[in-house]
Image (spheres, helix red, strand yellow):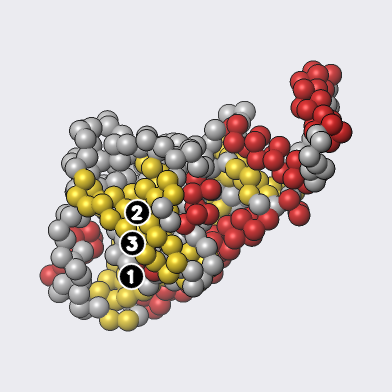
Amino acid sequence: MVLVAVLGGGALFMSGYSVGRDQGRAPGSSASESDAWKPFWNVYDAVTTRYPLGPVPRTTLIEGAIRGLMESVGDPYSSYLSPEDYTGTLNDISGTFEGIGAEIGSVDAAGHTSDCAKFGANCQLVVIAPLDGSPAEKAGLQPGDIIMKVDGSTLDGLTPDEARNMVRGKAGTEVVLHIQRFAAPTPVPTGGAPSLLPGATEAPRQLLQEFDVTLVRAKVQRREVTSRVLANGTVGYVSLAGFSSEGAKQLKAAVQAHLDKGIKKIVFDLRGNPGGFLVDSLDIASQFIASGPVYWTEDAKGVQTETDAGSDGIATDPSIQVVVLINRGSASAAEIVAGALQDRGRAKLIGETSFGKGTVQEWIDLGELGGVKLTVNKWLTPNKRWIHKVGLTPDIAVTVPADNPPGADPVLDKALEVLGAAAFGPPSLLMAA
């Protein structure tokens, strides 16, 4: 399994994952390696033979050693996961989890996307997007909201995984979040860092509200695909919430249903999509791209490998017009698909600059000890752009105003205009497909 996904639903961080096991080598495979590991084994021996308040279970020591090893890497997308967290995170990726139902990530003090390893003054936990029908959505959480405290405890010094675990929990339990909400974004000058948070700018952000909100956690099943017909039956709309095998199947079926109606204009909505399994991003991109590269991967030695589209795409005919909607919450696998369609000239991107997550993680199954996720590759667009910490720039930029009225969608309005369908009626005139 390979995944490109964010801290989400209480679980994901943006990544791309593959699952493996027993891939490591024993330390000491060379004389220099053996010498390098002597201090560790000396300490391990001292703890197991001389610590008077023990014994400390061997599994506890091994787990702690692995956790420390992963923390020393300094990569927020590489970490050790306990057996519970390992299972829970895989469930999250598949679309089912227990928590508040929000994709979450990290930003710096100015509100820009940040790959910080521990939270503090210049690393804050941010809501990227509440999921439809979730406790987070019902409580009124908004993209860009900063989570300062959980149940009265600050997140300072915690890793992303530790902070995530504080937010999520068993269905039916309560959690109190202390939120900071900032003013609408001020555009960052060309060449500046990408904005994630409303208010992200080179100048100090303007704090609008600071408040506590109590949420009751729930078991959340993310609805992967939403499909509608717009503009008097001339435009097919499909929205994808995450990248899983089920989501890929639903997406293909939804697009096929539109094509069967004779619809030749497709709006593909990837806003708020945190990513998912890499194989599913390839499957989905291949529905629109007939052949050639979808993405490249680059390993630790700099070796680049091209991955091409499959041959079973259903909407690869150039006569089928496609536009893709993106925003600050579009990440990883969503960026792979959007970047592929943009580079290959298959679709225009409309909306805001995407999140900017350009690495792939491998899941290493440790059995009863849980697992490890480790960054093992960069991924690049077909034109070999590495969008990490930069994001994809839309072909047509549309900023949603802070006072956007309920039900209004200026990004979708622009998409319909680009497709030449705006004259057929407002996007509020929707029919179930």
Q: Is residue 431 left or right of residue 64?
A: left
Task: Please identify the quadrant where the C terminus is shown.
Answer: bottom left
Q: Quadrant of residue 267?
A: bottom left
**Front tag of 2 and 1:** 2
Q: The disc labelled 3 sits on which kind of residue?
A: Val
Helix, strand, or loop for circle 2?
strand
Q: Residues within 10 Å of mark 3 (few under 14, many from 20)?
A: some
Closer to the eye: label 1 or 3: 3
Q: Secondary structure at mark 3?
A: strand
Where's the N terminus, which quadrant?
bottom right
Where in the figure is residue 383, as x and y percent of width and height?
Answer: 42, 38
List the residue tagged with mark 1.
138
Residue beneath the point at 30% across and 40% down: 111
The residue that appears at 41% across and 37% down in the rendered structure is 120
In primary-sequence order, the first of circles 1 and 3 is 1
Find numbered disc 1 in the image and state the secondary structure of the residue it sits on. Answer: helix
Who is closer to the viewer here, 48 or 254? 48
Quadrant of the rendered image containing residue 35: top right
Q: Position of residue 243 (x, y in %)?
A: 50, 60
Cα distance in 3D space between marks 2 and 3:
7 Å
* Label ID, residue 213: 3
Q: Which residue is mark 2?
A: 178
**Label 2 to label 1: alpha-carbon separation:** 16 Å
Q: Residue type at mark 2? A: His
